[in-house]
Image (spheres, grey):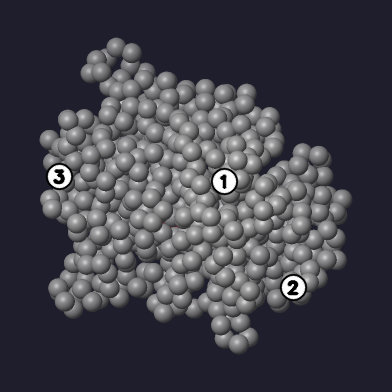
Amino acid sequence: MAHVDRQAWDVVVVGAGGAGLRAAIEAREAGMRTAVICKSLFGKAHTVMAEGGIAASMGNANEHDNWQVHFRDTMRGGKFLNQWRMAELHAREAPDRVWELETWGALFDRTADGRISQRNFGGHEYPRLAHVGDRTGLELIRTLQQKIVSLQQEDEKEFGAHDARLKVFQECTVTRVLTESNSGSAAGSGRVSGAFCYERESGRFFVLEAPAVVLATGGIGKSFKVTSNSWEYTGDGHALALLAGAPLINMEFVQFHPTGMVWPPSVKGILVTESVRGDGGVLRNSEGKRFMFDYIPDVFKEKYAETEDEGDRWYEDPEHNRRPPELLPRDEVARAINAEVKAGRGSPHGGVYLDVSTRMPAEVIKRRLPSMHHQFKELADVDITAEPMEVGPTCHYVMGGVDVDPDTAAATGVPGLFAAGEVAGGMHGSNRLGGNSLSDLLVFGRRAGLHAAEYAASLADRPVPDPLQIDTAEAEALRPFSAEDTGDGTDAGRVPAENPYTLHQELQQAMNDLVGIIRKESEMFEALKRLADLRVRARRAGVEGHRQYNPGWHLSLDLRNMLLVSECVARAALEREESRGGHTRDDHPAMDRLWRQINLVCELADPQGDSRAADPALGQIRLSRRENPPIRRDLLELFEKDELAKYLTDEELSR
Ligand code: FAD
């Protein structure tokens, strides 16, 4: 067996974004020795980029808001495919999580009478997003980090070592979740026993042994060419779960945020926060028309303004007017922009216009949207206080993810594995509402930490990592350095190594063009063919040099994850023959009530085998259908029957 350093912990949290940090705080407060491991520098997680705010029905800006209204909005946004229990817990607990942040030192923007200010966002009936200008994620991460430091200071006093019970391993990547020995297999779904990791700077391998591992690795956006996501979003947690034997659900649902920058090319995809529309920004096509009024779908007809005047009055008097259609859920706005551009009414660089300059005084824009003002000035030389922005859809968020128990965040089928945040599936159904991710991180991050701690404490014996899995993980990680080797120990069939950057670009292009915002059967077949080809070539992804900070090597390892996850997205998208939320089929444009009852489950086709040994051309994913559990009656009663009839079958309604 290879010699790798090992350290023993009670709970290992993979990821130091909002979900990971909140989980780690909870596990440590429950008395567990907790390790947090993250790919980037501590504090640089993707959460830091979150702009608009955290959704929580505190009722500060409108006293009619409460958890039931938030639950209703979330279910509507997700087109009723949400794991309803998660949506319930989220809506009930989000206010407590925001108030808790405040007690830990977060400084939110205030209302005139000193309460936490809340702003409008798409799909939310009332102003609900607690915010710090358009830099909310930064404040969230800062506060959680500060809390971690204070816990470490307590440990310094008690044990003489600040990291005695809570340690952060930054710039380290986990490549495998380990389980205990399972009939000598190289992967398995025995109990979790730890994680196999490498230090990005030195390339050194090490194992964090622990009976409980919380995945909090975020999303998958880097599999697409145009994305708002940062380099870290390579679907690692999704892949780690699959490889450990845990299924993913509803991976076809990928959110394309309607407003990303479209120009200049080097910044294409960077997010333009929804707060711009929440604060009054409007969308126009090249003819100057506010086109969103033409795109209000039947399910939302009664809730949105029919005229510009009514929409504009809503900002001042929401009690007596309906909201403007620029604030429809993201999937609707993204499709509308796509249609306008296709119809030849787009802006010069292939987007549409988003304008705040004619809607608010310059100083208000600078105060409420400081990052957007800075972003456009610096990156596109556009002054948003004087001229409109050009925007278009960008891959932003994945609704699908690890199949988890709603209450405990435990992953299905692998004892000791937990998942929270963007990597977990179910909560947002087919489409996430803006602001509901930051609250999701806090609500389910806390739950994951709590239940991981309880699980670890409940075990009579510690699962021991399977030595064979450690050897396999090491060999797998080293493979890019001998990529020309076919792996069978012979020279026969030696072929030149593939460049990981080229493979990544081809993958991104294929996903963007063939499994993007509007999908067709023939294109998805083509995508699966290209993915099969890329999978074969990715086995030969090769790098030169050594293990000390070698980004090409890191990307070669990330490719495994992106390919696995992309296959899940394409397979599930091909299977779901309807359009719903973040999944639009050109050939099946309607939403189908029968499909609402179905979750699509992706599992590794050969969980007991070494993924290296399986024929990579055959595909690695087994897809199955699982019935969605019926929504609890008291929650259904929060809706009018007419509205339910749009989503539920007659049989479900009569039940
Ligand atoms: P992250 O914050 O991404 O953290 C993931 C962590 O996992 C990182 O520390 C990373 O290093 C680590 N990691 C990943 N893989 C590995 C591995 N293999 N080994 C070790 N570590 C690993 N949502 C809102 O609710 N409101 C908003 O206003 C909002 N604005 C947004 C603006 C932008 C520009 C973007 C891109 C997103 C926005 N979102 C917003 C969405 C929200 O920010 C994300 O969904 C959320 O931050 C995800 O948090 P997380 O904790 O799940 O993951």
**Residue 273 visible in the snapshot:** no
**Which mark, residue 655?**
1
Residue 397 lies, in percent from the top left, at 53, 49
Residue count near mark 2 (Cα–Cα under 10 Å), binned few <14, some 14–19, many ≥20? few
Label 2 close to label 3 by CB (< 8 Å)? no
Choose mark 2 or mark 3, whichever is in front: 2
Residue contact between numbered discs 1 and 2, judged by CB atoms under 8 Å: no
Residue 256 numbered mark, or none: none
Q: In which quarter of the image is residue 454?
A: bottom left
Per the model, the C-alpha gap separating discs 1 and 2 is 35 Å
**Residue 514: quadrant of the picture:** top right
Between disc 1 and disc 2, whose residue precedes?
2
Q: How crowded is mark 3: few (under 14 residues within 10 Å), some or many (20 or more)?
A: some
- Does any atom of ligand 1 lie closer than 8 Å to the CB of label 3? no
Of circles 1 and 3, which is in front? 1
**Residue under numbered circle 2:** 319
Image coordinates of residue 506 in percent, x first then y, are 53, 31
Q: Dividing the image into 4 quarters, which one contains the N terminus? A: top left
Q: What residue type is labelled 2?
A: Glu
Q: Name the residue under label 3.
A: 464
The type of residue carrying mark 1 is Arg
Disc 1 is placed on an element classified as loop
Does 302 sit above or below residue 368? above
